[in-house]
Amino acid sequence: MFKPVLLMNVDVPDGHLLATYLAGGGYQALAKALHEHTPDEIIDLVKQSNLRGRGGAGFPTGMKWSFVPTRADKPKYLCCNADEGEPGTFKDRIIMERDPHQLLEGLAISGYAIGAETAYVYIRGEYALAIRRLEQAIAEAHAKGYLGPRILGSDFNFVVHIHCGAGAYICGEETAMLDSLEGKRAQPRLKPPFPAVEGLYASPTVINNVETLACVPHIIARGPDWFRGIGPDKSPGPKLYCMSGQVRKPGLYELPMGIPLRELVQECAGGPLPGRKIKAVIPGGVSAPLIPASGLDVAMDFDSLAAAGSMLGSAGVIVIDDSACMVKVATRIIEFFHHESCGKCTPCREGLNWVVKVLRRVEAGQGGAGDLEQLEALCKGIFGNTFCALGDGAAMGLRAALTHFEHEFVAHIEARRCPFH
């Protein structure tokens, strides 16, 4: 039976306090990193573990760290993207609320590895409890010497600042988040240059997700071989899955990377609601294309889901049963993307505006001949032509709904009403 790693303290009374974290071996990995390894050795250990970013893209974490120039005229920064704006996703919030010192230890080790003495946690302002818990944890860690000057008697200095965002989905894109940190309107930047070379304040910067950073202390404490022994070779390690939607037991589950989606939904989350059948599942937040019920045997890892035409994304698993209207589901998702578009590029700004108009017309029973073809043409104009991945996610999601549930769109147009209501 899999024993939780990242969630081992979430149900422990006062799990957010330093005393509880220390009692479970907390900050021992930081001490080991500072006193037994050089920064380059830490990067090498993370490379050996094959830890891939848990924020959505799945880029190898150790490789990202290695892109930071060893010699730089400007200070280096470490940024934690804790905005978590993807609908259906709440894993980072639980870590910050229930076990914030795990994140802080991961930040400190990562900062040591890349040579950064300053870190920023960019967190959505709605996460009031998480913000309070992080502030308390930072104060506790400073008081005991786990943050601040000369940590644990070493020459390493490290401070963590919290920056509250205003809940903009676009800040999940790393360069848009950097612009927001700098006090600008959050819009993605042209790359290259990449943040590792020219990021925050035009300085070398690494951006990692909360769950990614929380994995780091465990890799240092237990070794890369242990981490690689969990899940598939190309996407190893423990993984947090957010279960929501029309399912019996929604919640946050920690299981090995690569668990079959069917097992996750049917066994772990209890399957669909009584009397219902699963119609589709969104495996990685609403930016991930849905998978019909017939495709649920896919493994929940980066490569397997990509081969199946979807993506792991944030692992926000949303279950949709046979009572749901897929036209309504698609309309609501595209409305979200349209609302959250930063407006920087024309394909996303104007394309999603037209997609929403057509979908609303179809859902209201006012669709006509050529509407589905127009939707496909709009998707083609958006996908691959936008400044960042927001437009791509919207287009991919709509295309999947049109591909697997075209008959429902046709039924709305022919019957001139929604057959589900």
Image (spheres, helix red, strand yellow):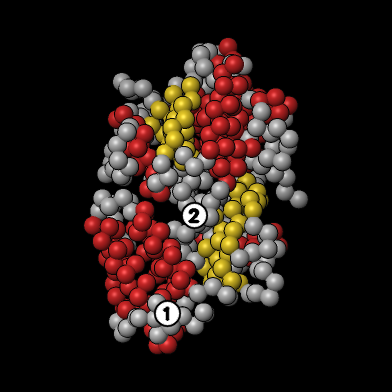
Q: Is residue 6 above or below residue 319?
A: above
Q: Which residue is mark 1?
A: 409
Q: Mark 1: which secondary structure?
A: helix
Count of all numbered marks drawn on residues in the image: 2
Quadrant in the rendering for residue 386: bottom left
First of labels 1, 2 by sequence position: 2
Q: Amino acid at mark 1?
A: Phe
SS assignment at label 2 = loop
Above or below, 191 relative to 251: above
Give me the residue at 65% from left, 60% from top.
264
Locate residue 166, reporting x and y percent: 41, 41
Task: Compare residues 231 and 19 and report the one nearer the observer.
Answer: 19
Q: Is residue 367 left or right of residue 284?
A: left
Name the spot of residue 267 as percent of width and height, x first: 71, 62
Tell me how far mark 1 sits from mark 2, CA to CA.
24 Å
Q: Which residue is mark 2?
A: 87
Identity of the residue drawn at 70% across and 32% down: 14
Which residue lies most toward the right here? 1
Q: Residues within 10 Å of mark 1 (few under 14, many from 20)?
A: many
**Relative image position of residue 354 (x, y in whole percent):** 29, 67
Q: Residue at x 73, y 35 (%)?
A: 13
Q: Amino acid at mark 2?
A: Pro
Residue 12: image quadrant is top right
Instruction: Give the image location of residue 102, x and y in percent.
Output: 61, 32
> Is residue 140 rendered to the left or right of residue 338?
right
Q: Is residue 71 above or below residue 194?
A: above
Note whether residue 42 is visible.
Answer: no
